[in-house]
Amino acid sequence: MAALIEMREIVKIYPNGVVANDGVNFSVDRGEIHALVGENGAGKSTLMKILYGMERPTGGEILLDGQPVHFHSSNDAIAAGVGMVHQNFMLVPSFTVAENIVLGQEPLRNGLLDQAEALRVTRELSQQYGLRVEPEAVVDSINVGMRQRVEILKTLYRGAQVLILDEPTAVLTPQETQELFAAVRKLVDQGKTVIFITHKLREVKEISNRVTVMRSGKVMGVVQTEDATRESLARMMVGRDVFLQVNKPPVTRGKKVLEVHNLSYVSETGRTMLHNVSFNVYGGEVLGIAGVEGNGQTELAETLSGLRPAATGTASVNGKAILNTNPRTVRLSGVAHIPEDRLTNGLALTASIDENLIVDRYFRPPFHRGLFIDYKVVEKQSADLIQEYGIRTPNGKLPVKSLSGGNMQKVIVAREFTSDPALLIAAQPTRGIDVGATEFVRDQLVKQRTDGKAVLLISADLSEVMSLSDRIIVMYEGEITGVFPDAASVSEEELGLYMLGIKRQTKEEMEAVL
Amino acid sequence: MPLDVVLRGIFSALFAASVLRISTPVILPALGGLISDLAGSINIALEGTMLVSAFTGVVVSAYTQSVWLGLLAGILAGVALSALLAFFHLSMNTNIILAGIALNIMATGGTIFLLYILTGDKGNSSSLASGAVPVINIPLLKDIPFFGTVLSGHSIFTYLAFLLTWLVSVFLYKTRLGVHLRAVGENPEAAASLGINVKKVRAIALLLSGFLASLGGLNLSMAYLNIFQRDMTSGRGFIALAAIYLGGRKPLGTLIAAIIFGLADALGNQLGSLKIPSQLVQMIPYVATIVALVVYALRTQAQVRERMHKFQQREAEIAAKASGD
Ligand SMILES: Nc1ncnc2c1ncn2[C@@H]1O[C@H](COP(=O)(O)OP(=O)(O)O)[C@@H](O)[C@H]1O
Ligand SMILES: [Mg+2]
């Protein structure tokens, strides 16, 4: 039997010269769950965007059911029964669930939109595939898990026979992941074929029939899932043995550095995003904040770093109040901040690497003398940091936007770690960067802690929070719902229950351990 | 003229009618701007588009002696200018604001230049015998006191403005293209991933905005006045942009905001007969625009503060109760 999908010798060179796919052969059989794994930047999304008609291959051919096909746009792919759920969701926030599902192929009556029909179809599909959604809810107001179900329904509405899911579990809790897996199995039972992209090897073992491993634009191997081990897959992915275990020497906890008491934040639209949050971070520890994204973590990092005003509460660093001041005051009080959104808050993209490395210190000596910036000193520091932090660039004069994601993050890390902070706030520090850079950033965070700094780590990657933290706090709907004084002794499933709001500790329980 | 006469003037049916008349050339371009703004391509060139259409309508109607050909030519000219903007922005990837500013400047200079070539006059087209759009007297309604005066006897454009507000609303919320247009404006990537052609939708939106702005321009030179004057749009294209935001980017809101500007303008005209320097009076619509925008911004900020304040009070009460226990 011919494969349902066959991609042969696919080459993709982006206009900027990046060779994202380099002679890739990829095939999928009808009715299978095929895992596509590889590090960030391996070229998985690119390959799938080519299959979905969003990117044109530079070379190679695609066969569907043995017939060569040429997709000029996603429309062609959709018509051929290929659907894709993207890594970053593609929804229109102000539209309802039903409106999003039918967008592009809206049912009409007398030439006008037929809302009732849209709702009916949504309900029907939702039932048929066991994907729970609220058809009339506005997408802006629904949680990540439901948004993902909306995305899957969107492809099903378009009659997809093959579903491509691009890192669908990256934003889900363990429980939501299980729910997704159940839905995927149901899809396959009803005759669909699923391509599942991930870099979590445990998920590969659990859900897939077959695995294709990619590394730097090439396929490193295709194996039956039952023949593979997590170790063998990891070796293929990275090209060497990997120790994703972080080496964390024991240290004794130092004095209290950050003290947060009853912190609340109300958004501009009046929503309470943080409610009476209290905790402390001590020198020599990493305090990890776990939680599904959008439960107040962003607001917490940004009120503490002076980017947003707090509604109530106090926060101090080494006894100095920092709330409702401004970022410079906060920084001068000894706070460094690796922001979640590095492209808007972490870097000035068109400015040079040199300039980005001094934006928090250009106004002080030795960088500033008299009226002017002393560029000799700036360049000297920059050259040292590029060397020390392994930032891959020919020189510091280039604009930051010419760097890859991992190297951009290294620029931020280099700046923040060398400002000699008492407290380091790291928000999603390894999101979207390659394994090498991830290892580096994690090692650096642990090193800061071992050197006696206080580290507040906010991450949606549960395994990251668990491996780096000394203590863990779980946030749910803007409140702290669980405190775990010993990060090593709590399981992922247990944290998941708190992240979903199914379990929560009482105030007394939390106070006892905080 | 004494103040009481002026006041009597303001509280009259004629005044209400003049508000509608004066609002029309703001409502029409504002609806156009709304469409392109919702599609994510803000049309700064509304002003220039109106000017070019106003000019073309007058010239063509004068030379053909046909009002309808004049209107048609004016509309085509306005749409063509928008097509140019769409080409610069969507095909050549220029910044739409810069392209819009360039077109506005070109429209100002270009119309004066052509006016001079055709008439030898740089100020207005009074030497051309251009046509005018007839006013419509609505049978029965026109005989009802007060309402008759307010609602009947306007040019086609005024009725069109209200009809189009409704049509634009149906278009944006009830048709496929309208929904695609809003989706493209809010999340172009998502729209593209569903096979919606983002550039095509934006191009259509810009053309529609050009069409509506051209009606606004023609209204000025072929109904409101019967001649073309240099710079006769005098900022209405920009006031229209302000109306979109004050109207909360909704058709009805935009209509209301545009009428409020019309009111300010009409008020200015009435006060013009008082012993106040005319330059001051002429400033009224523009000052009103700035004041309205500032009030809008202050109100938004106040709401944010108010919400935070309420939250703090509520929390304080809860805390007080807890310590009372
Ligand atoms: N639109 C684009 N333009 C230029 N380079 C890109 C683009 N999209 C991805 N790349 C580059 O192509 C490579 C592969 O990326 P991607 O396919 O997203 O990998 P993966 O999904 O496996 O993480 C990366 O180096 C990335 O930076
Ligand atoms: Mg990817």
Image: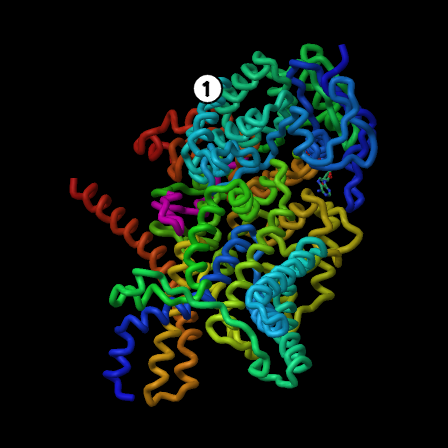
Taking the magenta stretch, the answer to whether it contains residue B133 is no
Q: Depth check: give the residue in front, A221 or A112.
A: A112
Q: Is residue A272 magenta?
A: yes
Label 1 CB less than 8 angstroms from ligand 2: no
| Left or right placement of residue A260 versus residue A156 in this view | left
Chain ID of residue with mark 1:
A
Asked if residue A471 shows in the view, the reply is: no
Q: How is the image coloured?
A: rainbow
Is residue A120 something one can see in this rendering?
yes
The answer to whether residue B320 is above or below residue A24 is below
Q: In the displayed structure, does residue B322 sit left or right of residue A484?
A: left
- Looking at this view, name the residue that lies furthest to the left: B325
- Give the residues drawn in magenta, as a range: A250-274
Q: Residue at x 62, y 61 (%)?
A: B76
Quadrant occupied by the N terminus of chain A: top right
Residue A189's spot in the image, x, y percent?
A: 57, 12
Q: Is residue A212 left or right of residue B296?
A: right
Q: Quadrant of the C terminus of chain A?
A: top left
Residue on which the image places disc 1: A127
Q: Residue at x 79, y 24 (%)?
A: A68
State the SS at label 1. helix
Question: Ligand 1 sits in which quadrant?
Answer: top right
Q: Quadrant of residue A217?
A: top right
- Most foreground residue, A396 or B8: B8
The image shows residue A277, relative to residue A98, as above or below, that is below
Percent coordinates x, y for residue A55 in the rendering: 72, 37
Q: Position of residue A235 (x, y in %)?
A: 74, 23
